[in-house]
Image: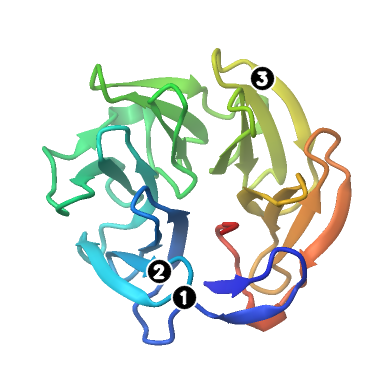
Amino acid sequence: FRVMTPTQTKVLRKLDDTGRINGAQAVKIGPDGLLWVVSEEAGKILRYRADTYDYVDTFADVGLGWGATGIAFGAAGDVYVSSYATSVLRRYAIATGERLGADLGAGTILRGPDNGMLSGPDGKIYIPGYDTSNIVRYDPAAGTFSVFVPTQANGIRRTRGLLLSPDGTKLYVSSERSGQILRYVLASGAFDREIASGLGTVTGLAWHPDGSLLAAVGDASNGRVIKFDPETGAQRAVLVQPREGGLSGPTYVAVI
């Protein structure tokens, strides 16, 4: 995980040199104003100051091998953490760190929930199923899971990143293995359009301050961050070049 300025490709620093971060996955600003980082291979959810990037604490220790990937902040002062290895969600109280209830499983419709998991404006949790190549929606009020985008719909192979449009009406989706960025209507789940294709490997998605769609593209040897036009998919620039600052196998992009 490396901190960079969004307007130029200057590497500022590694977020943490102590070894706490191992297998960096989702990175988000929480409702507490802190920077939350999922450290998959260390089995921890970490928090840092968003202004100085200083380490604050380990919010949760989910255990080695549990495979934490994504985080989504609920409307009730809670946070959901997804497990790639066990295909469940776990819920914690943000104020206390207390684990709330039993793990939530969707059964066969969800395998390998990944780091793009997010909370929608409708209060539901949207979960990319990496192994099931779909998107599943969890309704906290009803306590139920449902399929939002079916398996391999529109060419999806290994769903990874999810990103809401600025107005909250559309959902951008990265399909890691098919090299696509797709867009869906959030209210209905209807397919809207293919934004980009032929990208090889594509993972994390984020919004650049100038309105460009950012995508992490490539693998350990050529991983980079590209700016796209969010409507046409035209490439505007390569924001972060391959291997810049030691970048290798990018999984997630966050603009702070």
Helix, strand or loop at mark 3 = strand
Q: Quadrant of residue 256?
A: bottom right
User: What residue is disc 3 on?
Assistant: 191
The location of residue 66, given as percent across then percent down, is 26, 57
Q: Quadrant of residue 46?
A: bottom left
Cβ–Cβ under 8 Å for marks 2 and 1: yes
User: Considering depth in this image, is 211 or 153 the residue closer to the camera?
Assistant: 211
User: What residue is disc 2 on?
Assistant: 49
User: What residue is disc 1 on?
Assistant: 52
Q: In terms of sequence position, does the residue under pointer 2 or pointer 3 come before the other?
A: 2
Q: CA distance from mark 2 to mark 1?
A: 6 Å
52 relative to 184, above or below:
below
Q: CA distance from mark 1 to mark 3?
A: 41 Å
Answer yes or no: is residue 158 visible: no
The residue furthest bottom is 18
User: Considering depth in this image, is 12 or 137 the residue closer to the camera?
Assistant: 12
Type of residue at label 1?
Thr
